[in-house]
Image: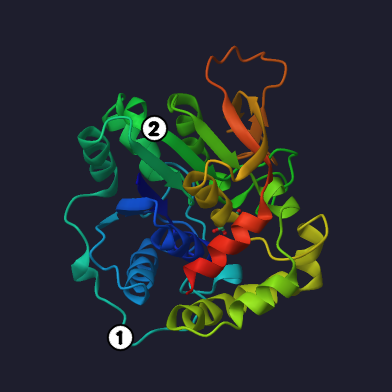
C-alpha cells in the first residue's frame, strides 16, 4: 500500500480528495495534518473530522497545524466553500475536536516520515505553512519523503485570488517559496490553470451526485453551494476552457494514488514571487534556467479524466 500524509485546509475539494484516498484500496493514510486556508483552522479541523466520520474512519490521526500564514494576513475562501468551509450545511452531531492528536502537524509529519524513510507520499492541498515549518524544524525531512504532490500555484500568471495568484500560494507566499526551494524530493504540481483545463463535464457531476448512498448524500450536500457558484457565468469565465467542474485538490491526490493518472507533464525549476505589487504569490517558471536551481518539479499538463471519474464514483459508494 502507498503510505500517505494528507496536508489539508478542508474545503469542499479537500473533502473530495480525502474521500478518494479513503476509498482507494492501495492507500494507507498515516495522518491528516490541518492548515488554515479555505476557512479558519478551527473549521478545517471540524470539517476533516466530519469527513472521516461519514467514511467511518475516525481512527485516522488528525493533527492541528498553523492557523495563519508566516507573514501575510490571513485569507479564506468562504465565498466558494461556504463560511464554514464545507458548504454551510452543519452537522449537529459533528465529532468534537477532543479527537485531535496532541502532537502538532509539522512535528507529526517529521515523525511519520522518520518512521518510514522514503516511503511516505505527502499530498498538500492547502497553503503550505505546515510544510514550510517542518523543513525549518528538520532540514532532512524532505529527503525522507518518497514524493510530494501539491495543488497550488499557476503557470500562466492567471490568478483566481489576485490578478496573478492562485489561492494556496497567495494565502502564504513565503511558505510556498520555502517549500519549492527546499523540498528536493520528486515534486508534482497541479496548478490552477491545469485544473481549469481538466474540468469535468456537468453531465458527469449531476449523474455522480445523484447516486444513492450515505456518502453520496453527504457529498451532494457539501458540494451544492460551490457547484452553484461554479456554474455561474462569472466563475465560468475564470475557468477558461470548455467549462465544467474543477475539483482542484482532487487532481493532486489522484496523481499520488495512481502513477498512470498523469499523461503529460513538464519538468522545470520553479519559484514564487514575493515582492510584486500585483504578482506576490505567483508561481514563476524558470524555462531559461536562469535561477540555476538544481531541483526541478513536474508540472502536470494532461491527465486521464476517465480514471478520475472512477475514483470520484468509488469515493461515494
Ligand atoms: C485551491 O484553493 C482552494 O479554494 C481549493 O481548495 C484549492 O486548494 C484552488 O486555488
Chain-order first, disc 2 or disc 1: 1
Task: Judge left or right: residue 114 versus residue 302.
Answer: left
| Residue 146 - label | 2
* Image position, residue 212 (x, y; %): 52, 85
Dot 2 crowding, Cα within 10 Å, few <14, some 14–19, many 20+:
many
User: Residue at coordinates 33% horizontally, 30% vertically from top-left?
Assistant: 118
* Image position, residue 112 (x, y; %): 24, 41
Say above or below: 50 vs 185.
below
User: Residue at coordinates 44% horizontally, 27% vertically from top-left?
Assistant: 185
* Image position, residue 287 (x, y; %): 71, 21
Which image quadrant is residue 279 in? Answer: top right
Task: Judge left or right: residue 212 versus residue 307.
Answer: left
| Residue 93 - label | 1
Say above or below: 12 vs 228.
above
Query: Which secondary structure lies at badge 2?
Result: strand
| Residue 142 - label | none
User: Residue at coordinates 67% horizontally, 61% vertically from top-left?
Assistant: 246
Quadrant of ligand 1: it is bottom right
Q: CA distance from mark 2 to mark 1?
A: 37 Å
Please tell me which residue lies in front, 160 or 269: 269
Dot 1 crowding, Cα within 10 Å, few <14, some 14–19, many 20+:
few
Which image quadrant is residue 42 in? Answer: bottom left
Task: State whether residue 65 appears in this view.
Answer: no
Amino acid at each position: 500500500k502507498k503510505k500517505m500524509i494528507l496536508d489539508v485546509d478542508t474545503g469542499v475539494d479537500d473533502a473530495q480528495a480525502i474521500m478518494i484516498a479513503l476509498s482507494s484500496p492501495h492507500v494507507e493514510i498515516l495522518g491528516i495534518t490541518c492548515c488554515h486556508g479555505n476557512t479558519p483552522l478551527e473549521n478545517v479541523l471540524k470539517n476533516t473530522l466530519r469527513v472521516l466520520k461519514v467514511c467511518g474512519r475516525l481512527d485516522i490521526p488528525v493533527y492541528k497545524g498553523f492557523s495563519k500564514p508566516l507573514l501575510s494576513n490571513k485569507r479564506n475562501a468562504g465565498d466558494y466553500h461556504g463560511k464554514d468551509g464545507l458548504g454551510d450545511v452543519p452537522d449537529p452531531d459533528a465529532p468534537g475536536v477532543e479527537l485531535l492528536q496532541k502532537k502538532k502537524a509539522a512535528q507529526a509529519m517529521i515523525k511519520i516520515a522518520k518512521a518510514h524513510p522514503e516511503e511516505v507520499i505527502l499530498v498538500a492541498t492547502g497553503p503550505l505553512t505546515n510544510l514550510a515549518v517542518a523543513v525549518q524544524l528538520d532540514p532532512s525531512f524532505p529527503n525522507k519523503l518518497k514524493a510530494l504532490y501539491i495543488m497550488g500555484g499557476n503557470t500562466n500568471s492567471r490568478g483566481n485570488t489576485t490578478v496573478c495568484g492562485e489561492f494556496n500560494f497567495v494565502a502564504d507566499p513565503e511558505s510556498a517559496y520555502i517549500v519549492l526551494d527546499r523540498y528536493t524530493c520528486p515534486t508534482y504540481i497541479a496548478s490552477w490553470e491545469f485544473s481549469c483545463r481538466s474540468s469535468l463535464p456537468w453531465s458527469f457531476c449531476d449523474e455522480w451526485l445523484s447516486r444513492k448512498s450515505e456518502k453520496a448524500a453527504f457529498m451532494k450536500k457539501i458540494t451544492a453551494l460551490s457547484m452553484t457558484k461554479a456554474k455561474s457565468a462569472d466563475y465560468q469565465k475564470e475557468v477558461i476552457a470548455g467549462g465544467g467542474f474543477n475539483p482542484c485538490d482532487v487532481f493532486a491526490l489522484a496523481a499520488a494514488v495512481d502513477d498512470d493518472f498523469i499523461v503529460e507533464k513538464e519538468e522545470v525549476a520553479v519559484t514564487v514571487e514575493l515582492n510584486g505589487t500585483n504578482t506576490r504569490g505567483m508561481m514563476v517558471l524558470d524555462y531559461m534556467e536562469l535561477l540555476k536551481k538544481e531541483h526541478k518539479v513536474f508540472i502536470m499538463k494532461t491527465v486521464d479524466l476517465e480514471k478520475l471519474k472512477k475514483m470520484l464514483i468509488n469515493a461515494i459508494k
